[in-house]
Amino acid sequence: MTHIQDSAEPNLFPDAYPHDQFPQFVWTQRPPALPAHAWTTETTHRDGQQGGLPLSAEQGIQLYDVMCAFTGTSRAVRQAEFFVYRSSDRRMLAAAVERFQGGAPIEPTTWIRASRADADLVGTLGVRETGMLASASDYHTFYKFTPGGRTQAASKYLEAVQTVLDAGLKPRLHLEDATRAPREFLLPFVQAVMELAAPYGDAGRPKFRICDTMGLGLPYTFVAWPRSVPGMVGEFLALDVRGEDLEFHPHNDTHLVVANCLSAVLAGCAAINGTLLGKGERTGNAPLEGVVLHLLGMGYFAENAPDFTQLNALSSIYETLGQGVPAKYPLYGKDAHRTRAGIHADGLNKFWPMYAPFNVPLLLGRPLELSLTKDSGLAGLIFLIKSHTGVELQKDNEELLSLHTHLNAAFEGGRQTAVEWEEIAPQVLDLISTQGGNAKRP
């Protein structure tokens, strides 16, 4: 038999899984293209609305305020993006601009179509930067315009860029459908934008948002253009586009949204664009909270970390909009930290980090929870009571065993729904008051 090395103490890998931080990347070799600084930008107010989030002006500002409370002084979220076409959107934008000018940490920007009329409009709204739609694939350039084609599209985009520059604004080109765009159009177009903006200095230095619009990008260097996200980032950097002037904006159609974001950062892209809790078109956008969690793991925001407890407010906000957070949604779903299995509950009773990915109560401000089912066992009942009362009843407590038997009988009798704390609380509290001698108290 192969010899297994024993140890007097457990190895819990504290460098990778520190007790009071999110999981860390322990580099075997630091990626050479990793940006000195990385951050996120937000498009809940634009792509979230476009994807069906019906924001009033007041609700939009409420989201902006929550996001500012989350980012604090960390600069984890640096910009928020607003529509400008409806009066409610302009009220949102005006309120955000006022807050930013008063010291709020997130700069408002806008999104426009690449037209002279839209560019003229944005010049009056008090922002310093605007995003501009620049559809990049032949799926768009050949079929969106009349007459269609690459030259027609590029000419239209560059005319709008010129207007934005003349208005004293920084253009941010949203390269829609970049992961289906031909290299022979996309890269020369980027160069043309940079040449057009060169006389305007740093104030007009353009930004480029690589949009994986249909979620088709792959997080690998060993696949061909246009699907390789790190490969495309590398090609932009080779054109002397600075990493801080690059953003990556993916969707989740093929389940790779966060992986693609991280691959973009590792390749040198400094900014990831996404939405709060991933709300957006079809399957959604990059969830900013998930991306920021991993940026923390890479070592960013070490001195001033964002406050993830602030994002708990989003659940109720989205609920009022009819866009509730799915129960099992990571981090903030109501069941994200809830177990129903007795073996997990037993582990939580013995050593709670066994079944927690990190210190959930500390970092998210959310409890580790349990719902009682036919699979929860006596350990589940003990954990539920302890988590709500601080009292750990012993397994041989007769009243506890009686309650457990009663619950099992209900499940054997056909009950399908879980038993929650509120249902058994009166009986448990009475049990504790009369049988407290057979319990451990904190």
Image (cartoon, rainbow, N blue to C red):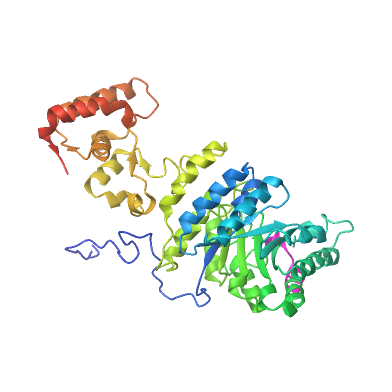
Quadrant holding the N terminus: bottom left
- In the drawing, does residue 137 fall left or right of residue 99? right
Residue 185 in magenta stretch: yes
Q: Is residue 138 visible?
A: no
Quadrant holding the C terminus: top left
Which of the 4 image quarters holds residue 228? bottom right
Residue 347 in magenta stretch: no
In the displayed structure, 97 sits above or below 168; it is above
Magenta range is: 175-188
Q: Position of residue 237 (x, y in %)?
A: 63, 76
In the displayed structure, 221 sits above or below 390; it is below
Q: Position of residue 241 (x, y in %)?
A: 65, 75
Please give the count of numbered marks on the rendered protein: 0
Tell me the residue at 64%/46% (across/down): 49
Q: Position of residue 40 (x, y in %)?
A: 54, 62
Which of the 4 image quarters holds residue 56? top right
Q: Position of residue 401 (x, y in %)?
A: 19, 28
- In the drawing, does residue 149 fall left or right of residue 277? right
Residue found at the very far left of the displayed protein:
437
**Front one among 275 and 405:** 275
Residue found at the very far top of the displayed protein:
413
Secondary structure mostly taken by the magenta-highlighted segment of the chain = helix
Q: Is residue 99 visible?
A: yes
Tell me the residue at 54%/47% (across/down): 62
**Front one among 2 and 32:** 32
**Front one among 64 and 297:** 64
- In the drawing, does residue 344 fall left or right of residue 432? right
